[in-house]
């Protein structure tokens, strides 16, 4: 894993943690913790961003994240709040008296007495009148290791589980009925390790990736398919360099084949080093906006590969200040998500799996439709012979028309009166016959419903006297 390094911490602060090892600390300085929402698929990553000494106390600042704004309505209903605390708040203060007392503070203030014994009680949230008690001492398997655990019961019915060597392993959400369970520790490589972009683009020689792509700009539409084969791999100090062979075509143009260098992403990239739910400037979209790095949909896809989604939010400075004026309760923390449909999905060892990007009148899609890994093929991977012949991508259409092209719900087909086909055949871009329709002699036009067809490129061909005749290609969006 390649993550952002912590800023330099003084020897005095480091020694505070080394003295007691983990020793019932809620979280430790150099560890990165991954928590999963109970019964859900949302993940939260918590770590210490920085530390300072305040008198005899040590103040640990925890990472902040971007979260949806529940109070924003109207034009701002898709807004996100930046610099938001997670369930362990923004700061954790360790008492200088070395008595195991920690105060976590931000929107709520609560105290955890980590050295308390069974039967001990204390004021957990004094302002709310909530107390805490150690009700049970346990030995549990945590991420494959047996550890001592204290179960802390709160007077409002919530509970916390604190382990000696893994910190907080369960924490009830104080705002809802949900809870957060520890599922992984990044630094020590235990349990669920959330992948980063270095993992996504780690290919092997011989891997093959097949893509389909389309774009729509105003009244123009284009479609392409291309295949990339990894020929060589060189690992540099801060990046992986590949030599690839790319074969493909753009509809209406000549197909191509070329060998070229490809460096999909640099290890120093902010995307490589991003943490879950972090707000950052993207170096993949030329700095045009922000990316909200979200593992809220961290999941295993159909092929068993881990996938991750990133939603793209354009930030307009004028709208940002307008939002501050209209929503003073969130002031500088409001981030307007003006491009709420943009989405990028990546898979470990697969790179980009799908992309949907749009701006003003421009919109494009990229989809990984198949790949070869370790000699095994998943999905659709076309042969070079299919991708390269020029005639496959030119329309022999002097006597046949298709409109609208691209089609959405229906496509209209017409031909000249003298042709009199007996049927028409529709093929998918993979060459497989999709459907065949009989045609009556007096007809020179048909309407085909395409609303439920898979998006992509199709070919329609006339059959005259049992012989294949003219054909034309059309696209279904």
Image (spheres, grey):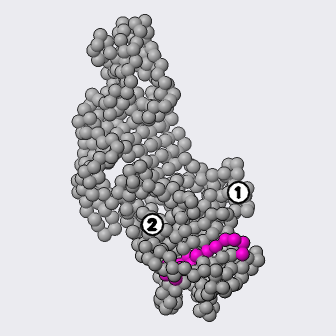
| Residue under numbered circle 2 | 192
Label 2: few (<14), some or many (≥20) within 10 Å?
Answer: some
Q: Which mark is residue 71?
A: 1
Q: Position of residue 323 (x, y in %)?
A: 68, 56
The mark that comes first in sequence, 1 or 2, is 1
Task: Relative to 175, say whether 382 is above or below.
Answer: above
Residue at 43% across, 73% down? 144
To which quarter of the image does residue 385 belong?
Answer: top left
Work out whether residue 273 or residue 107 is closer to the camera in this orientation and state it: 107
On screen, residue 429 above or below 440? below
Q: Could you say where residue 77 lies in the image, as x and y percent from the top left? A: 66, 51
Mark 1: few/some/many CA within 10 Å (<14, 14-19, 20+):
few
Q: Quadrant of the N terminus?
A: bottom left
Name the secondary structure under disc 2: loop
Q: Is residue 436 left or right of residue 67?
A: left
Q: Give how far apart the Cα atoms at labels 1 and 2 are.
A: 33 Å
Residue at position x 49%, y 68% from top?
A: 183
């Amino acid at each position: 894993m390649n993550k952002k390094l912590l800023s330099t911490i003084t020897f005095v602060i480091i020694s505070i943690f080394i003295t007691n090892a983990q020793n019932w600390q809620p979280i430790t300085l150099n560890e990165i913790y991954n928590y999963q929402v109970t019964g859900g698929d949302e993940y939260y990553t918590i770590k210490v961003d920085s530390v300072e000494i305040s008198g005899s106390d040590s103040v640990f600042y925890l990472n902040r994240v971007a979260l949806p704004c529940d109070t924003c309505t109207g034009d701002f209903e898709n807004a996100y709040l930046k610099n938001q605390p997670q369930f362990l708040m923004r700061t954790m203060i360790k008492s200088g008296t070395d008595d195991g007392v920690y105060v976590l503070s931000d929107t709520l203030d609560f105290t955890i007495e980590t050295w308390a014994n069974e039967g001990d009680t204390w004021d957990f949230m004094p302002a709310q009148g909530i107390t805490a008690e150690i009700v049970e001492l346990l030995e549990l398997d945590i991420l494959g290791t047996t550890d001592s655990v204290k179960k802390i019961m709160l007077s409002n019915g919530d509970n916390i589980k604190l382990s000696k060597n893994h910190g907080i392993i369960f924490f009830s959400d104080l705002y809802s009925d949900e809870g957060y369970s520890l599922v992984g520790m990044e630094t020590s490589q235990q349990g669920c390790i959330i992948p980063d972009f270095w993992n996504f683009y780690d290919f092997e020689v011989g891997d093959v990736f097949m893509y389909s792509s389309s774009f729509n700009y105003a009244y123009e539409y284009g479609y392409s398919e291309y295949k990339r084969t990894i020929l060589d791999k060189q690992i540099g100090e801060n990046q992986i360099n590949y030599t690839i062979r790319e074969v493909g075509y753009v509809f209406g143009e000549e197909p191509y084949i070329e060998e070229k260098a490809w460096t999909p992403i640099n290890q120093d990239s902010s995307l490589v080093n991003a943490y879950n739910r972090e707000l950052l400037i993207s170096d993949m979209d030329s700095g045009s906006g922000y990316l909200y790095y979200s593992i809220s949909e961290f999941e295993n896809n159909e092929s068993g590969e881990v996938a991750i989604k990133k939603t793209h939010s354009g930030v307009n400075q004028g709208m940002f200040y307008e939002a501050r004026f209209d929503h003073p309760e969130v002031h500088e923390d409001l981030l307007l998500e003006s491009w709420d449909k943009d989405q990028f999905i990546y898979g470990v060892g697969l790179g980009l799996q799908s992309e949907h990007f749009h701006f003003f009148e421009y919109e494009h899609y990229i989809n990984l439709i198949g790949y070869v890994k370790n000699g095994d093929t998943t999905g659709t991977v076309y042969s070079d012979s299919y991708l390269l012949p020029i005639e496959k991508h030119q329309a022999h259409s002097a006597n046949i028309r298709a409109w609208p092209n691209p089609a959405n719900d229906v496509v209209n087909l017409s031909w000249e009166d003298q042709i009199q086909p007996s049927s028409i055949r529709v093929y998918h871009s993979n060459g497989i016959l999709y459907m065949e329709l009989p045609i009556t002699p007096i007809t020179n036009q048909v309407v085909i419903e395409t609303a439920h067809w898979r998006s992509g490129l199709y070919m329609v061909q006339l059959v005259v006297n049992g012989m294949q005749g003219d054909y034309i290609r059309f696209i279904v969006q």
